[in-house]
Image (cartoon, helix red, strand yellow):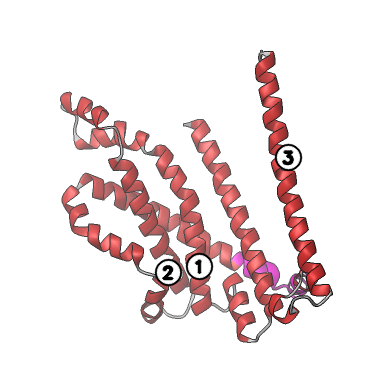
Amino acid sequence: MYSREHKLYLRKKKIRKILVIFTQILLAVLLISIWELLATYKVINTFITSSPSRVLSTIISLYNDNNLFNNIWTTIYETLISFSLGTIIGIITATILWYFNFIYKVLDPYLTILNSLPKIALGPIIIIFFGANINSIIIMALLISVIVTIITVYNGFISTDKNRINLLKSFSATKGQIFKYVILPSSYSTIISSLKINISMTLIGVIMGEFLVSKSGIGYLINYGSQVFNLNLVISGIIILMIVSYLMYIIVSYIEKILVKND
């Protein structure tokens, strides 16, 4: 049984959450309404800024032509493949770097350089090696996600409480046992949190790849729209991308809550 004070706290928390969601929706409606009014009364140039009604019409047209979900699915598929590979390879690599400190010291400057290097600069090289196809898109997104995962997870490993490590060492525990019983459990929340960062970075990589080589996908729609000066298509693609990105983030956050709850 909850106390009266606790029930009151939960009620206030629920009301606050509803109020936040309502305000978010109200703000979105307000901004869209202002945008439409400015476009209707020609305060803004609709050739450059488009308008909500034109964007909606473009999205409906994409749907009627069976192009909407085909392009969305292409981007989601490429993102899921890159995200899965990046997460798995990143965690395994971070584990190896923690286990063999010499390898980490050797690779540390290279990881720093790769992390700071704009991956789109590697686009032409990737295309030459893997061809102008989906493989190049996945590799480009993978390069972004795997580096971020390695750095994030490794930093989680080395941030583990040293006293707990020393305690196991005093009982003659092996490095593998220390990793299994101290490092990995302590870094569990870091690994899960890295998923939210990883999904966003992977989607960025996929869109960059689609700009360069794809003939389908959300990135392709945006790029094609800019080439033919169809700003309605460009903004429609951006809005679709925002929705897909938000939904992916929500799904990963939900998975995170389940994993943390079951931990």
Q: Nearer the viewer, residue 108 or 172?
A: 108
- Disc 1: CA contacts within 10 A as few (<14), some (14-19) or many (>=20): many
- Residue with the mark numbered 2: 140
Name the residue type under label 3. Answer: Leu
- Disc 2: CA contacts within 10 A as few (<14), some (14-19) or many (>=20): many
- Residue with the mark numbered 1: 206
Q: Earlier in the sequence, mark 1 or mark 2?
A: 2
Q: Tag 3, which secondary structure?
A: helix
Q: Residue at x 57, y 51 (%)?
A: 249
Cβ atoms at labels 1 and 2 below 8 Å apart: yes
Cβ atoms at labels 2 and 3 below 8 Å apart: no
Q: Nearer the viewer, residue 14 or 87?
A: 14
Q: Tag 1, which secondary structure?
A: helix
Q: Which of the 4 image quarters holds residue 47? A: bottom right
Name the residue type under label 2. Answer: Met
> Can you give x and y, in whole percent of width and height, for residue 102 in the image?
16, 51
Q: Which of the 4 image quarters holds residue 131? A: bottom left
Q: Tag 2, which secondary structure?
A: helix
- Residue with the mark numbered 3: 19
Q: Residue at x 24, y 57 (%)?
A: 108
Q: How far is disc 1 from disc 3 in space, using C-alphas?
A: 35 Å
Whether residue 241 sits left or right of residue 210 in the image: it is right
Q: Main secondary structure of the magenta part?
A: helix
Q: Residue at x 35, y 47 (%)?
A: 153
Q: Is residue 68 magenta?
A: yes
Q: How far is disc 1 from disc 2 in space, using C-alphas?
A: 7 Å
For the magenta stretch, what is the residue range?
56-73
Name the residue type under label 1. Answer: Val
Which residue is situated farthest in the bottom direction here? 228
